[in-house]
Image: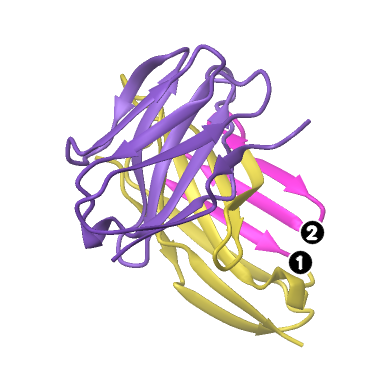
Chain colours: A yellow, B purple
Amino acid sequence: KQEVTQIPAALSVPEGENLVLNCSFTDSAIYNLQWFRQDPGKGLTSLLLIQSSQREQTSGRLNASLDKSSGRSTLYIAASQPGDSATYLCAVFGSGAGSYQLTFGKGTKLSVIP
Amino acid sequence: KAGVTQTPRYLIKTRGQQVTLSCSPISGHRSVSWYQQTPGQGLQFLFEYFSETQRNKGNFPGRFSGRQFSNSRSEMNVSTLELGDSALYLCASSGGTGTYEQYFGPGTRLTVT
């Protein structure tokens, strides 16, 4: 059974800092890994998707890496802003027979202090 | 292109009642998945439908059921509501093949009293 762990559970940084969020998963049989952002009481916004054959993806100030063999991914946020405050969720899409589901970590709650 | 829509956005029900939630996927998407989000358990997979067929189901009791229509719209039903069913229910759509990138709707907040 796939398990996804995110460290740290919460993070508070001053505005302008660069930061790294970590995600690990136990089963390397995945199609892809997605990073999402969730604001309180809202749905999920997709930030980046990395296919299992890729090593990293970049979008603006965000960069995500994937090491499938070690079961790890990181999300790097450059020059953090107060508007980045949210919960960040990592999820893997399984490739095992009959999977077709995302397995989520519990998230990292990020607070960027002005 | 319009995003994923879910109705209703908020719902208050009494224990023992049943409820139906609706999800309209992005135009052209054939896969719809449902997830339950609670503070204690986080996001948990309920089921996934592709072209009206359920391809996978999570570990939830039989009170939770779903279906998908020929236009890809999906509904989920919860019968005999329990207090523990209070949660944010999220729907995601994708093409169903290829990248499997998931796009989520705003969710339905269900409160059971």
Residue A10 placed where, x, y %? 49, 76
* Residue type, numbered disc 2: Arg
Magenta stretch holds residue A51: yes
- Say left or right for A42 vs B39: right
Residue located beneath label 2 in the image: A61
- Say left or right for B88 vs B98: left
Residue located beneath label 1 in the image: A78
Instruction: Point out the image quarter for the C terminus of chain B.
Output: bottom left
Q: Give me the chain letter of mark 1.
A: A
Q: Range of the magenta residues?
A: A50-77
- Say left or right for A39 vs B46: right
Q: Are marks 2 and 1 in contact (CB under 8 Å)?
A: yes
- Residues B5 and A100: in front is B5
**What secondary structure characterizes most of the magenta part?**
strand
Residue B79 placed where, x, y %? 23, 41
Is B90 above or below relative to B34?
A: below
- For numbered disc 2, what is the local secondary structure? loop
- Residues A93 and B21: in front is B21
* Residue type, numbered disc 1: Ala
Tell me the distance, in whole angstroms, between the alpha carbons under discs 2 and 1.
5 Å
Is B97 above or below relative to A72?
A: above
- Residues A7 and B36: in front is B36
Instruction: Point out the image quarter for the N terminus of chain B.
Output: top right
